[in-house]
Amino acid sequence: MSSLLHCCGQFGFAVALLGMLGGCAIDLKDPYNDRARLRETQKEFTQYMRWGLIDKAAQFVVDEQRAEFETLAPSLTELRLTDHETLSVESIDENHARVLVRFQGYTMSSPIERTINIKQDWTFDETTRVWMVSLEVDLLRKALGIAAR
């Protein structure tokens, strides 16, 4: 009898262990690993900004803001970002996230280092399976010292 209980106990443990492992392997809320893709995309966008590759950064900007963002290209390419840090990532829902990024840098025309926090609203397009950013272009323009157009 105790052998039977021992065997049943081991079987129950094995089933529980497999259930936990299966739960770890499959994230039902993120079946395509889109959150990891958000982190990668946001990092890539930030790196393009850091190195002045504005044409590449613009590919991640939502259509409604892309032209306005691209008008900043001459000033953004003059920008030298010395550091950046992701301060927070807030998940709004499965397809939306808000990221706060701190940039430090200076422009070639004014070599005084400044710090600016920029809010990035990221939206996942289920059709294209791409994360796109909407950001505070006016705040970025002000930080660059460009008069509003």
Image: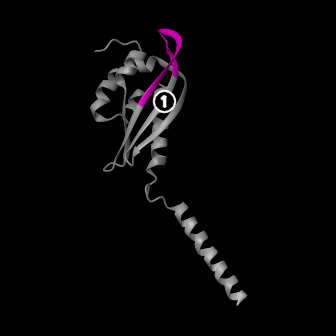
Q: Is residue 86 above or below residue 141?
A: below
To which quarter of the image does residue 74 belong? top left
Q: Helix, strand, or loop for circle 1?
A: strand
Q: Position of residue 33 (x, y in %)?
A: 46, 53
Residue located farthest toward the top when viewing the structure as drawn: 110
Residue shown at 36%/49% (left/top)? 129
Write down the region rendered in magenta: 104-119
Q: Nearer the viewer, residue 8 or 134?
A: 8
Q: How many marks?
A: 1
Q: Residue at x 48, y 30 (%)?
A: 101
Residue ID at (62%, 74%): 14
Q: Is residue 22 magenta?
A: no
| Quadrant position of residue 113 | top right
Residue tagged by mark 1?
101
Quadrant that contains the C terminus:
top left
Q: Main secondary structure of the magenta part?
A: strand
Q: Which quadrant is the N terminus positioned in?
A: bottom right
